Image (spheres, rainbow, N blue to C red):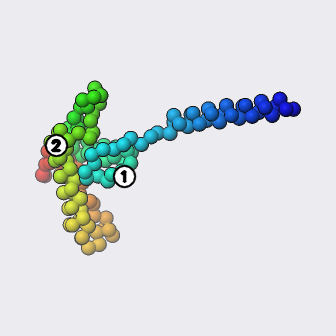
Amino acid sequence: MHFHKRKFFVFTVILSVLTIGIISFTIPTQPKLRNLKVLPQNISHDSLEHIMDGFKAALGVKCSFCHVPSKTQPGRMDPASDENPKKDIARAMMRMTMEINEKYVGQIPHADSVQIQMVTCATCHRGKSKPELQ
């Protein structure tokens, strides 16, 4: 009987160690986001990716339109770098659309009841890298 208790204890310890090991490898760690000047500092990686995907679709571009290649990791982008001036233009455009939505669209009486659309990158860009007026 004592042998079975010991066997059960060893089995439980091994199972616990394996479980902790598996969990530590499967729980994704949140990468440290750097150099956010317009977006919130505490934005989740998934939310940031969603926003970047929206920019790519609205402008019909790829990541390299605003981001430069990494100098330390070949084949990867350096999202924190400010070397590409288009990144500053994107920030200015983000501030502009936020201001338009807050100062103007947000002040339209009954805007929430008639579902007035907010201004986004796609409002002017329509899938092109340069904004186009109709």
Q: Secondary structure at mark 1?
A: loop
Q: Secondary structure at mark 2?
A: helix
Q: Which residue is mark 1?
A: 42
Which is in the foreground here, disc 2 or disc 1? 1
User: Among all residues in the image, which is located at the extreme top?
Assistant: 74
Q: Residue at x 55, y 37 (%)?
A: 23
Q: Residue at x 46, y 39 (%)?
A: 28
Say few, some or many: other residues with alpha carbon within 10 Å of mark 2 (under 14 / 14 to 19 / 20 or more).
few
**What residue type is disc 1 on?**
Asn
Q: Nearer the viewer, residue 126 or 119?
A: 119
**Disc 2 vs disc 1: Cβ atoms closer than 8 Å?**
no
| Quadrant in which the N terminus is drawn | top right
Residue 106, how many percent across, how many down?
26, 67
Q: Residue at x 24, y 62 (%)?
A: 101
User: Is residue 103 visible in the rendered structure shown here?
Assistant: yes
Q: Residue at x 20, y 62 (%)?
A: 100
Q: Which residue is mark 2?
A: 86
